[in-house]
C-alpha cells in the first residue's frame, strides 16, 4: 500500500514536470514565431554608406624613415533604407588605411538618430602625423605615387541600435569600408609644397557595410 502511494506521487510529479516543460517549450516557440513575424513585416536592412568626396591637404611620405604624414577631409553619406526602422549611431569613428595599415588617427563622428529613409552626411578631417610604415608599405606607396594612383580605404567603426516604435534594440557592431581612388598629378603640388603631390579623388564610391 505504501509502495503504491509512493509510485502515485512520483507519477504526479513527472506529469507536473512534463507540463512545465511543455509550457516552456510552447513559450519558446511562440517567441521565435513573434520574432519571425516581426522580421517578415519589417524586413530590416542595414544602412547604405557612400563616399561622396575626399580632398587631400597633406600627404608626405618621408623616404628617410618611411613615415607618412597625411591630412584628408572626406565626405561620407549614410542612408537608412528602412520604412519602419530608425537607426541610432553611437560611438562611431572614422580613419584611413593603406593596404590594411591604419595611417590616420580615429576621428569621432557626431552620434545621432537617423529616421526612416533619412540621409546623414559627415565631413570629418582625418589626421596622421609621422605614422611609421613597414618597409614594404613605404616602398609600395612610393611605387603607387610614381605610377600615378593611390588606393586608400576609409573605415568607419562603431555601434548602432535599431528603433521600432518605442522599442530600441541593444548595440550592434558597425563596420564600413569605403575605397578612396586617388590619382597623382606629378606636374602639380598641393599648396605649393613640393613634398605634397597633387592628389585628386576620382568619383563617388559605394561602401561595404557589415552589421
Image (cartoon, rainbow, N blue to C red):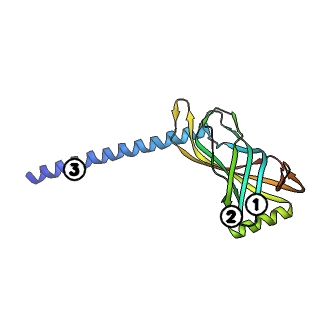
Number of the front mark, 2 or 3: 2
Can you give x and y, in whole percent of width and height, for residue 41 in the image?
Answer: 60, 36
Number of the front mark, 2 or 1: 1
Circle 3: element type: helix
Can you give x and y, in whole percent of width and height, for residue 201 in the image?
Answer: 82, 49
Identify the residue at image location x=74%, y=56%: 152
Q: Give the number of the disc on residue 11.
A: 3
Residue 183 sits in quarter: bottom right
Mark 3 packing: few (<14 Cα in 10 Å), some, or many (20+)? Answer: few
The residue carrying mark 2 is 133
Can you give x and y, in whole percent of width and height, for residue 79 in the image?
Answer: 70, 38
Circle 1: element type: strand
Tell which circle, 3 or 1, labels the residue nearer the N-terminal end.
3
Judged left or right of residue 150, residue 126 is left
Identify the residue at image location x=55%, y=45%: 172
Q: Is residue 174 above or below residue 169?
A: below
Mark 1 packing: few (<14 Cα in 10 Å), some, or many (20+)? Answer: many
Residue sitting farthest toward the bottom: 136
Identify the residue at image location x=62%, y=46%: 93
Instruction: Give the alpha-carbon distance from disc 2 to disc 3, as whole Å.
Output: 73 Å
Disc 3 and disc 1 in contact, CB within 8 angstroms: no
Residue sitting farthest toward the top: 166
Q: Give the number of the disc on residue 61.
A: 1
Amino acid at each position: 500500500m505504501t509502495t503504491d502511494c509512493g509510485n502515485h506521487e512520483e507519477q504526479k510529479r513527472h506529469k507536473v514536470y512534463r507540463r512545465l516543460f511543455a509550457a516552456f517549450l510552447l513559450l519558446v516557440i511562440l517567441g521565435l514565431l513573434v520574432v519571425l513575424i516581426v522580421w517578415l513585416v519589417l524586413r530590416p536592412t542595414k544602412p547604405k554608406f557612400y563616399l561622396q568626396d575626399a580632398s587631400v591637404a597633406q600627404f608626405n611620405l618621408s623616404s628617410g624613415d618611411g613615415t607618412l604624414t597625411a591630412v584628408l577631409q572626406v565626405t561620407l553619406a549614410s542612408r537608412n533604407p528602412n520604412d519602419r526602422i530608425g537607426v541610432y549611431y553611437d560611438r562611431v569613428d572614422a580613419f584611413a588605411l593603406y593596404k590594411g595599415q591604419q595611417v590616420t588617427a580615429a576621428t569621432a563622428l557626431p552620434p545621432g538618430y537617423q529616421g526612416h529613409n533619412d540621409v546623414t552626411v559627415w565631413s570629418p578631417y582625418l589626421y596622421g602625423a609621422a605614422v611609421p610604415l613597414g618597409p614594404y608599405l613605404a616602398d609600395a606607396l612610393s611605387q603607387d605615387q610614381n605610377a600615378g594612383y593611390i588606393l586608400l580605404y576609409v573605415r568607419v567603426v562603431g555601434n548602432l541600435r535599431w528603433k521600432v516604435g518605442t522599442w530600441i534594440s541593444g548595440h550592434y557592431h558597425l563596420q564600413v569600408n569605403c575605397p578612396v581612388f586617388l590619382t597623382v598629378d606629378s606636374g602639380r603640388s598641393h599648396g605649393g609644397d613640393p613634398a605634397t603631390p597633387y592628389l585628386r579623388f576620382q568619383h563617388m564610391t559605394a561602401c561595404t557595410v557589415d552589421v
